[in-house]
Structure formats: C-alpha cells, structure tokens
Image (tube, rainbow, N blue to C red):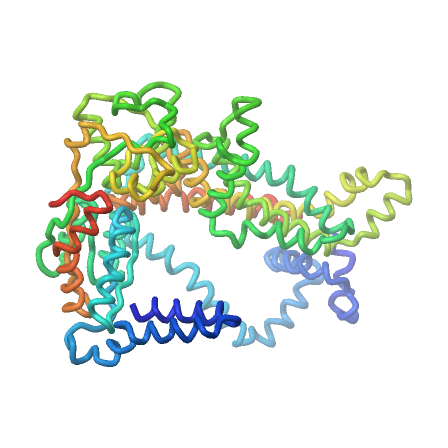
Amino acid sequence: MTSPDEPGAATGPRTDRPRRRRAGTGVRTGADSGTGGGTAPRRIRAAGRRGVPLPLLLPGVLALAFLLLPLLALLVRAPWRSLPHQLTSTEVWQALQLSLVSATLATAVSLVLGVPLAWLLARTDFPGRGLVRALVTLPLVLPPVVGGVALLLALGRNGVIGKWLDAWFGITLPFTTTAVVLAEAFVAMPFLVISVEGTLRAADPRFEEAATTLGASRFTAFRRVTLPLIAPGVAAGAVLAWARALGEFGATITFAGNFPGRTQTMPLAVYLALQNDPEAAISLSLVLLAVSIAVLAGLRDRWLTGV
Amino acid sequence: MTPSVRRTRRMLELAGAGAAALLTLSACSSSSGSSDTASGTSGSASPELSGTVTVFAAASLQESFTALGKEFEQQHPGTKVTFSFGGSDTLAASITGGAPADVFAAASPRTMATVTNAKDTAGAPVTFVRNQLEIATLPGNPGKVASLKDLTEPGLKVVLCDRTVPCGAAAQKALDASHLKLTPVSYEQDVKAALNKVELKEADAAVVYKTDVHAAGDKVEGVEFPESAEAVNDYPIALLKNAGHAETAKAFIALVRSAEGQRVLGQAGFLKP
C-alpha cells in the first residue's frame, strides 16, 4: 500500500508527510533491499554513501551485545551432555505444553478484551481518560508478585469478587489452569493495549469517518476499515503479550500456585529446578528459549513483515 | 541502633511541629541513651568490631534474626547487620554464585552442604537451632484437622512446600514415615508462600514450621502432629570465606549461639540444637 507513494518519498519534501508512514516504509525498505526492486534502492545507496553515524552505531551494537550476552552465557554453560536426559522427563513436556497453551489463551483473552479497550482509549473522549490510560499500564509497573497477591485478593476464594463466585457458582479460581491464564493475561494485556492504542492513534481516522459518512455504522467501520488498517499493530501487540505471558512467573506462582501438569508452567519449573539442580534449570531455560524464538521468528515472517 | 534512633528522632521531628516540648524531651532522652555517646566512644569500647555484616538467612529466621540484629547493633555501636531472607536453596545458589554475604544461616544441612561443597565457607558450619513441622490451619480450624492423616481428606485444600526446599523435603519425610499419600493443590516455592496461602484463606491447611505458625499470630491456628518428630530440621550457620568484616561476622554468630540468642530463637518457637 505504500508503493504508489514511494517516488514522492524520495524526491518530495519529507517534512509534511504523515507521521504514520515511517514505520510502514521502514519495513518496506528492509524487504525491498533484498529483492532490489522499485525505487527504494536509490535511497539505500544514498544512505550507504553517507555511512551509519557512529553515535548511533556504537550504542546500538552495545545494546545488542548487552541483550545477547546473558543468553550466550546460558548456551556456553549449558550441560550439553546431560541435556537429552534432562529433557526426556514428562514433567518438562507437561510444563512446556501448559506454558504454550496458557500463554496462547492469555493472548486470546487479551485480544478479545484489549483491542476494544485500546479503541475506547484512542477514539472516544471521556473525562479521566488520561487516568484510565495510566491505570491500564499499572500491571507493567506492579511487581508481578504483587499482581498475584492483588489477583488473590480480588478473585481468590476469599477475595472481593471470588467470594461471590464461590458462594453462587462454586467456582474457586486459585490453583487451577484458569488462574494461570488469568494471571498471564493480567500482566500481558497492557502490552497489547498500549501497542494497539499507539497504532490506532497513528492511523488516519478519516478512513473511518469516510466509511461512516457512506452509511456504515461505527462498529462496521471499526470491523471493516479500522481493524484491517491496524492489523500490524494488533499482531505486534499480540506477539508482545504472548511473549510476556510465556515468561510470566511471579503472578502465576502467587495466584495459581505450583502443581505439575496443572499450574506449573516452564518459568515455575525453571525456578524450582534452580533451587537444587541448576543444570536442569539451564536445560529447561534453553527449551523455553528455543521454543519462544521459533514461534516468534515464525510469526514475524508470517505476520509482521508481510503487511 | 544508630539508624533506628535517628529514624525515631526524625519521625518525632516530623510529628512534633506542634509539640516542641516533646521533641526536646525525646532528643534529650535519646542522646543521653546509649546511641550518641556510644557512637562517639565506640572506638575505645570495641575497636575491632566495625562495619556491616551481611547475613543470608532462611525465611523462617526472619523475625528472630531481625531482633538479634538490632540487639547486636546496640551492643556493638558502629556495626550494622543487614539481612537477606529467602528460601535456603535460593540463598545458597546466590552465595555460590558470588553474592556478597558474610554469614549464611540455612534451614537444612543439605542446603548448607551446597555452600560447603563449593568451598565458600570459612570453617565448619554448626547447628544453632532445630525446627519442627506443624500444620497451619485457618483460624478456628474449620476443617477439624487434628492429625497429619486428616490432611489427606478429599475436599481439603492443602499446600506443601516444594520438595526442593527444606520445609517440603521435611514434610515429605514425615508423610513417608507415616505411609501417607497427600496430594496438595500446590507445591509452594518457600515456607512463607505456603503460609501466606492459608493466611489469605486460599488454602485450608499448610505444613509449615512451628516458628512460622508462631510468627503468623492469630491469622492461622497450629496443629502439632507426632510424625513431625521424624523430620526435625537442623539449622546450620557458618562464616563465609569472603566475609568482609570477619571479626564482626564471628561476633554475630557468637550472639546467635549465646544464651541470649537461644532465648530469642526459643521465643520464636525454635528448639535447642
């Protein structure tokens, strides 16, 4: 969708281009540089002549090294010889399966509830919206363990709402797989909401307005116009939320407890293995790492660049 | 002691905007007490004891060690005792990983062995207290738990410590000794987490230490069980190899093992070694 604009991007004045173009063209350029088609290479060559500015290159490379070094250490110290033995235990596969299922469910919950919330924050005006937006990010700053305690106080057997769930429906959430999903959704949803809200704000509302003037209801406009427009942002947010949910530890162990096969996710298994068998903990971490990298890389190819 | 006095004084200063007389009184009393005078003469009183001692101690020691730390600072002005409380295994792992600790007090000989095996201790560890298990139930014991066997009743939500931490290993030992099979709703990461689940009324019972039931006050009710004699935990304490102020650290260990230390620990529910 960006290609008709490309010549303008190279020659025309750049200052008055809408801001939202930046992310889109950035991705596009990356993809084009591989195939070498269209007008993009001209710009690439121009950039290459000037070189990468050192004040950006040095910190950038440093950041990359900083992020990758601990992972590298994990690989270096991994007990490769005993790895196959460590990974054949059923507990590991149980934990991995539970992790993947609960993180995916938590992402689904975040999508169903989080996208509408992001729309409300970006497209409607109500008093105290700034405060609500700040509150949405609360789980990000809250230590996860505190989040877990808060969930217990709200949804536990003796919690503010949980008390009624127990009395009326006989539902108790703590120590169940549902609790794992809830704990993960609690910490992961803000990532999705923030990401989608940012995309919504950058998206041009005139498309929606045009749709409504042509007779579409506001919901239809959202479904048929806005949603396809912000799909990359939703996908990026979902991936972030999924990754956060997969690594969730504090809220899960506090709210859902730790029982193999029911609430023991990989991070919990890693933590408890670390107590008396650090080698097993490293092996488990490697599995979690490999699986998450595989999934994220797969998704990135499919969703995030193919737009 | 110095910081605590300073804190009280600052608090009084803050509160005392309208109570200048009170402020003067308190300032007088605190400076006439041991703090200020002692900090001035601390060098002559005990020249060798100074600096900060960092103690890594099992979560169950929190209340009594905090009290002993305050006492130590009072006895030896110029010193400071800082604590890191947690699961013994986590602490052992961080010590072998190079965490800056001077003293390690573990809740089981096995966790201490991790540290001694890594040759991170200076001298052999000594057992300073023992701890026995107890069942913690909701206040009033609505589940009518009277024995370890009662915990196996279906419908009762029981939490245990994970087998990898001392309290979980001890609970398992007691259960095995009495040939009971107990399926808890959760294996918690440390004893305080297990106790918390009962305090928050999410679980009906937990198998924890006597000292934890003691510390929780009336938020839980303790039920002793004879099988706990099968799984009494020894608590070893040791000076660590990389201790910065070794003399001060040794003095703290001596306080823990002294009659006074044993009195404080006994009050918290610990058994004599």
Q: Residue at x 54, y 45 (%)?
A: A188
From where the camera sits, is residue A97 visible? no
Q: In this view, does A161 lie to the left or right of B40?
A: right
Residue A218 in percent (x, y) is at: 82, 41
Q: How many labels does the image show?
A: 0
Comparing B118 with B13, the one in front is B13
Using the rendered view, name the quadrant where residue A26 is placed.
bottom right
Q: Which residue is drawn at 19% across and 26% down?
A: B176
Comparing A135 with A36, the one in front is A135
Q: Which residue lies furthest to the front in this view?
A: B21
Residue A279 in percent (x, y) is at: 26, 46
Comparing A69 with A57, the one in front is A69
Q: Which residue lies furthest to the top in this view?
A: B154
Q: Which residue is drawn at 49% across and 33% down?
A: A158
Using the rendered view, name the quadrant where residue B38 is placed.
bottom left
Residue B16 in percent (x, y) is at: 48, 70
Comparing A210 with B207, the one in front is B207
Q: Residue at x 63, y 67 (%)?
A: A44
Q: Is residue A40 left or right of residue B190?
A: right
Q: In this view, does A213 lie above or below B224?
A: below
From where the camera sits, is residue A251 visible? yes
Q: Residue furthest right?
A: A214
Q: In this view, does A65 lie to the left or right of A7?
A: left
Q: Is residue A47 above or below residue B239?
A: below
Residue A84 in percent (x, y) is at: 28, 38
